[in-house]
Amino acid sequence: MTPRFVILSLVGLLAVPGWLISAPTEAVAVEPAIHSAPTASSSSAQLLPRDEARTRPVLRRGSRGPWVSAVQTALSVPVNGRFNRPTGRAVKRFRRSVGLTPRMKVNRKTWRYLGYRVVPPAQPPSQTPAAPAPASDRGDWPELRRGHVSEWVRALQAALAIDADGVFGPGTQAAVEDFQRASGLPVSGVVDTATWQALGDRVTAPAVDPTTSEAARSSASHRATIPVADFVGSWTARMVVDRESGGNCAITNPNGRYMGKWQMSQTFWEHYGGAEFAAAPHRATCEQQDIVAYRGWVAEWWSPWPTAIP
């Protein structure tokens, strides 16, 4: 090979693009980095502090309000502010996923694991939290405990954002205990003056039932001044009718002794003038049965209906 040819070959080699000279003989695949989502057990930094979790309400079936909506949003279930079955199932799945006992309940541990994915409901900017009413303003409010049935229980349930049926059952007791615990009160499950005071303005006192006042209890002449419509529409009357017959004016009990809307006996019916309307209570109209029940109530107060007073 002549020197001229060698020189030309070197020049041609230098003219070849660099990427051809350095190209690898085998392609190398480059995969995108994969970051696994942090779990509650792998990242304690995502847990809500215990002190903050302790201030949040315990939520269960029947709970209502903005905190329920916040949990529903965090768990991607339809948001309606009511702790219903779909919400309970979502809570149960979440608790299982983080190693908690699968229950339909949002308690302190659940709040911790939910962490900051729950956005606390904001107070309207125009409102400021109401100061608790002085104890003296609540001292004449009734003490409530399990087994009580009244409009006061209904007002309590509404304040606690649970189903308000007026019956102080185990669910209401549990909600009261949760509230007392969160408020730093003795956990008794009994609604006393201190509990009423802590509930503050979220409680709307019910209207007075004219059929259970002290004057109505002690004086037949006072009872006679209360109109039939007020008697029938009172909380106690509605509760009695619901318990006795469910509002069915044609019903009789299995042994046939008590009949109609108010479950009156034949003797009661005839004694208070029911025969002028029909031969038996369940044969009369609902309005006629109301009149006879009213006459008996004026004469005997609620004693013919033991279900009236818990």
Image (cartoon, helix red, strand yellow):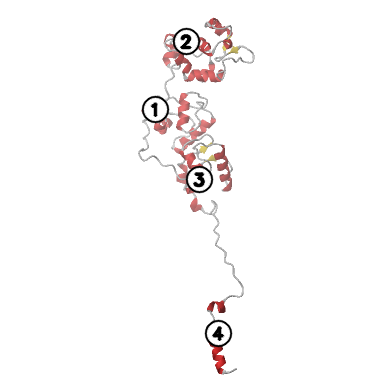
Q: Earlier in the sequence, mark 4 or mark 3?
A: 4
Give the image location of residue 186, x and y in percent. Answer: 46, 34
Q: Residues within 10 Å of mark 4 (few under 14, many from 20)?
A: few
Residue under label 3: 74
- Comes first in the chain, label 4 or label 2: 4
Q: Nearer the viewer, mark 1 or mark 2?
A: 2
Q: Which residue is mark 4?
A: 13
Calculate the distance from the C-alpha at mark 1 to the C-alpha at mark 2. Answer: 31 Å
Q: Is residue 104 above or below residue 298?
A: below
Answer few, some or many: residues within 10 Å of disc 3's Cα (few below 14, many 20 plus, some between 14 and 19).
some
In front of the other: 170 or 74 = 74
Mark with earlier residue (1, 2): 1
Q: Nearer the viewer, residue 177 or 250?
A: 250
State how far apart marks 4 and 1 are (Cα). Answer: 100 Å
Q: Residue at x 55, y 5 (%)?
A: 275
Up the image or down, 219 lies above or below 162; here it is above
Measuring 56% from the left and 88% from the top, which residue is drawn there?
A: 9
| Secondary structure state at the residue bearing disc 2 | helix
Q: Earlier in the sequence, mark 4 or mark 1?
A: 4
